[in-house]
Amino acid sequence: MGTRMEVAQLESRMNTDDYRKLQSLFLDPSGASRSLSRTEFIDLAWSSVGRGSKEEYGLLFDSVVVTQEHRGLLLDTDAVKEEGCVDWGGLCSFLVLELSDKVKNTRTSSVPCWQPPRTMTCPHRDQVQKVLYLESSGQYLTVSKGGTVGLRDKEDMSLLHTLRLQNSTVTPKDLWVTDMVLLHNVHKIAVSFTSKEVCFYDILSKQDFSCKYKLQGLKFTPWCLDYWVDPSNLDQAVLTIGDIGGQVSALYFTSTQISLFERRSLRTDADSADIILWDELVKGKHCSCYTVTHQVHAPAWVRKVRYLGSLEAFVSCSTRPQSSVVIGWREKESRSLRVTSLFTKRGVWDIDHHRGLNLIATAGVDHQVLLWNPYMTSEPVCVLSGHTSPVLAVRFMQTKQQLLSYSKDKVLCIWDVSSQQCIHRLAGVFPKTQEDTHTLLFLQEERQRLLLSFNSLLLLLETMKEEKRTSSHEHPVTCVLYNSLFRQVVSSDSASSVICWLADMGQKVKQFHRCHGNAEISTMALDGTQTRLFTAGTDGEVKVWDFNGRCLHRMNAGLGRAVEISQVLLLKRSILVMGWERMLTVFRLHSFSQSFVEPSEWKGGVQHRSDLLCAAFQPPQTLVTGSYDGEIIVWNNSTEKALRKLQPHAEHEDHKKQQGDSPDSHHGFNGKEVSENFIAITRLFFIPGRTSAAAATGGADLVSCGGSGVVRLWNTIHSRLVGQFTAHNRDLGSIVMTVSPCGKYLVTADREGTLKTWDIQHYCLESDDGITSEAPNLLCSSRPHLDRVTHLETCVHGNRLLLLSASSDCSVALSYVPGDTIGLFGQEEQWCLERPGPLHPQQEPEQDQRNHGERENTRQWEEEITSSSQ
């Protein structure tokens, strides 16, 4: 299997003339297209192009063939007369795909990583109607339905001051605020009321906000507001009003820096505010402002209004299908409007506009988010489907090509507009409220803050400091392995892809797509010779591959059912598969004479009371299995009989209860709930170097981890718990771990992407007849990932002990043990590890012993697989 590192260097050196020469090789003397064998391609390309070596052209040819075979491009192709040949189209397809993969794998991930949501102290007893950001002071302003205003700190959003808006037109108990906008160029706010008026308050008043103007005499109750200022002329501004009568009205201000309205009389009220009558504005009696209106939405309520200065148009929406969205275009040198209506099936709750893309997003009652070109309104540009209830709010992230949408069932989605895909979905973190909850969405991109209201409750979501990161995969990574034969790293993802990487440089070698169709690859394993890869899919099958991408065997683990496979364990004469039931599924050596392999019966039968999740083997014949309910069983693998069970001492469980541990649930393996009454076992490892003789003295020879961040060390001879410590915060749920080949280091990882390396060389080495609760020495802690770590693996590469970690954040990281993170596979800047050298004396025997044992364990069935596939 060749290295694509060299091919990448060849491709980067080739120019347009070189590719024209290559193209000519695929034409016969008559000018017809032809295919070339490997020998023909190498000889002709090397002599024709005049650059590169024959080895490089051989590697290029092999990569094209493997990619075509795996993607099915060679099937039923007239241009290809025999297997192992390529034509010009195949070569071009490969080069385009390689370029596409390079772009995708070097693009930075812009999916936000949210901090835990924070509930804000709220002065409001009724629903929050609006949140504003005051640019002049950097503070936040909230207003409730009852007119209570809250002023919040710009840094931590703590409540600084509260006041109640004054409006003598109605009694305090009848006061009902419908909306509020900031007039930032004149330091005022405009507030609409159900009393059919809009009041303008001065926010620079030394005392409580004072009312300066009252716009009264509106025909219908104003329901929503919008304010726009011409950035090139701060005197000119537009206040847009949408009401419950289906009318959209706009006030054009021409001299805001002097005065919003003219003082035509001394009409004031008890609040000392100037009274402005709507009819006077309509009749043009105020030279400083004039009005423009339309009633296309009637009789439906106008839910949202926006004035788009770049288009000189008003955009509004309603839940009436015929007038779901209405665009009112200003005619040049005229105060009339040209109106365009957009139709949707059930109407629209909310709208937003992306200035750079010039797209309008709509939040549909029919559960859909639509994107529209304002100049082509016959049908939407695209449909973003994914919500299962009415969409209540949409907000564009103006600095990115992304859109946020929030639905009635409390699901927040982030969409990549260019790919039209949902790249992030947030649910289960929002408070439980009544069915008719009023929800508001306020996004502040500059500070990466998202504020949501649920009636009177305010919830703050803030993103962690955004880092430019490389995605190793396009989808969450599920497993990672080290292949010592090829000195490569192998990783899998939830989209059923497998990628091989150069460990020395972090560069992709090759990628296999759709290994299990659309099913996720949940775990993988390598045989002892490192030439066969086992992939387990959620389709219930385990497949055996060679490293040319050829599937040799299909193992029917789920008996035709889609099941969650958590581990594949290779033993001397059998392969064990587990994860979805209380019994082991076993495949015998003799079964691999066929390409489709059926499981055999496990002689030990059902011994676990819950689903079996993981296992570990210690030569010559000790097998341990761990289950979802926290139980560990020790087996004789030769006889397949259960010998004993490992469970915490009863007095230890009583001690836990006295400490106040509650039966709260946390997420366990594959998203299952793990009760605190037991700790699901997600990983099991025998500690290398601790022999049966050592275990006979009472020390620990087995380590387990699982729910609530707990690590436990066991003595399998005496069936007792020797030590236990909390490696990660219990609120983070279940963890994963691995043990170094020398048995000195234990590495644990949690769902926040944090890795911890512990020194266990002398930890619980001897028994004192008690349970050690003190944690071992923590050597280092790092956070190379932004999301849940799904798999860990240590390896000796060259003369260094390294750690591989896979994560749901789509990345695979390489780190020193113990030590810093080296980098992420696929990153643009390549690293360079030291070349092979003498191993550390403490590492060498155990590593060699483990590899030797694996080779011996798998030699017989490996020979069987190889012979049956030929």
Image: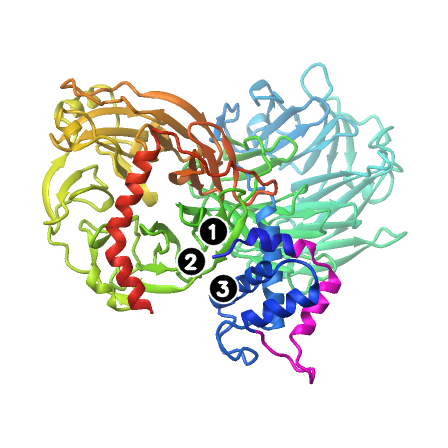
Above or below for 266 versus 530: above
Task: Say which amino acid is labelled 1.
Answer: Cys
Q: Is residue 449 visible?
A: yes
Q: Position of residue 234 (x, y in %)?
A: 84, 33
Q: Residues within 10 Å of mark 3 (few under 14, many from 20)?
A: many
Task: Say which amino acid is labelled 2.
Answer: Phe
Q: Residue at the spot x=86%, y=31% of the render?
A: 262
The reply to whether callout 1 and callout 2 are in contact (CB within 8 Å) is: yes
Q: Is residue 699 left or right of residue 42?
A: left
Q: Position of residue 680 (x, y in %)?
A: 25, 37
Q: CA distance from mark 2 to mark 3?
A: 10 Å
Q: Is residue 297 visible?
A: no
Q: Which mark is residue 191?
A: none
Q: Residue at the spot x=50%, y=71% of the render?
A: 84
Q: Which residue is mark 2?
A: 547
- Between discs 3 and 1, the one toward the N terminus: 3
- Looking at the rendering, the stretch of residues picked out in magenta corresponds to 11-36
Q: Secondary structure at mark 1?
A: strand
Q: Which residue is mark 1?
A: 500
